[in-house]
Image (tube, rainbow, N blue to C red):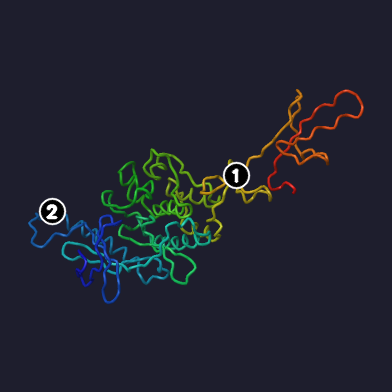
Amino acid sequence: MKNGDVIAGYRIISEPTNANGGKCMWAFAEKGGRQFFLKRFLEPKRPREGSTASAASRRIRLEVCEEFENRHRTIMKRLRPDARGGGNLVLAQDFFHEGSTYYKVTERIDTSSLEKPQALEPRQKAVLLKTLGMSLQQLHDIDVVHGDLKPLNVLVQKREGMAFHTAKLIDFDDAYVSRMPPGPQDIAGDSLYGAPEWRNYVQEEGDVRPEHLTTAVDIFALGLMTHYYLTGATPGHAAQYGSPADAVNAGEELTIDARLSDSMRGLIRAMTAREPGRRPRMATYLTALKDPQVCALQHRRPGTSRPVDAEPAGTGPVTTGTEPGAAAPRTSRIRANLTGGGSARPTAGTPEPAPASAPPSGPENTAAPTPPAEPGPPARRTSRVRINLGDRRKP
């Protein structure tokens, strides 16, 4: 396959590449005045006519190809381009083989550049995640598992004149019917976004069987992706584990960004649960996104789960300092006069007012107490505490 070639009527109009293509080569193609995305599968390969391979070898290769074809055609029958609400699913327009090689054709989608989805406003984030969630719900409603859900398989699009970005779900080459995945040697996926049961299935560890791979595999990946779209990173885990799924399989909890709302933290925690049956369904996910503020990031008081927005007015913002340009948390500065050998304790409340003739108080200006009018026993010396109240100090 090269630029200028014509394959089954599709003329290649770009240089083929393997970039992010896995076991495929891809290029843009044109047919009938329309442009398409054409993918060439590197495997499996059908036996060539006149091949000298043995009959047994040809039979095995044909069986593999038949299974490959059946899986793709089954998904294509279930995911029809004219299905209601399927506008954000980029589905196959054509699937065929020419010679020994298989090809798949989909619509070409022009996308906008969105390098930092975490920089969007909460409502923008909610719409982006909602369109992705609705596409995934369509798959799950017909018992289809996407099988390779990750940001690379989501095209973010913003049409001219539209206010919001939407998510286009692509690449259903590795999709399968729930509880009927390909074998451990043939199933695809990405270890970074793969679910715990998928990892065990691929590595043939434990007692994971094909029927354990359900639509919950996608829910785990979506939980990680939601964290990524909202914060710019996937949930954290100990460096000794190669992926979030490995950490969860080891009994470790993933580290959820503290800036996320409590509702979103709980949702992501549930979506990335080790047990597939404990993960929520897509309806729960979409319900949570009805309130855009669930996608907002909040700075919290260190050591608590209460957002700073809930603090009384006048205390000033408190940040974690992890954001670029974030101010360090403001600490109170207390100056106590403990001289004189007294054992007085600091007192709480309003600082003692300075005499009218005294200069403004500060680090170098502390007023001396007025001596007693009549001789007598010395008065007990009390501690004088002055607190810098920042912006609350009266002018």
Find numbered disc 2 in the image and state the secondary structure of the residue it sits on. Answer: helix
Q: Quadrant of the N terminus?
A: bottom left
Residue in the image at 62% along x and 43% along y = 330
Residue 156 image-quadrant placement: bottom left
Q: Nearer the viewer, residue 36 or 250?
A: 36
Residue 219 image-quadrant placement: bottom left
The residue identified by callout 2 is 57
Horizontal placement of 65 versus 350: left or right? left
Q: Position of residue 248 (x, y in %)?
A: 42, 43
All told, the count of numbered labels is 2
Q: Nearer the viewer, residue 214 or 105?
A: 105
Q: Residues within 10 Å of mark 1 (few under 14, many from 20)?
A: some
Q: Nearer the viewer, residue 140 or 232?
A: 232
Relative height, residue 361 to residue 162 (above, below): above
Q: Which-is-in-front pick, marks 2 and 1? A: 1
Q: Residues within 10 Å of mark 2 (few under 14, many from 20)?
A: few
**Disc 2 versus disc 1: distance between alpha carbons?**
67 Å
Horizontal placement of 254 versus 353: left or right? left
Horizontal placement of 30 versus 394: left or right? left
Relative height, residue 177 to residue 234 (above, below): below
Labelled disc at residue 301:
1
Q: Position of residue 89 (x, y in %)?
A: 38, 65
Q: Nearer the viewer, residue 32 or 145?
A: 32
Amino acid on which disc 1 is placed: Arg
Which of the two discs, 2 and 1, labels the residue nearer the N terminus? 2
Residue 104 image-quadrant placement: bottom left
Labelled disc at residue 371:
none
Residue in the image at 54% along x and 53% along y = 297
Amino acid on which disc 2 is placed: Ser
Q: Position of residue 208 (x, y in %)?
A: 34, 45
Find numbered disc 1 in the image and state the secondary structure of the residue it sits on. Answer: loop
Determine whether label 2 and label 1 are within 8 Å by CB: no
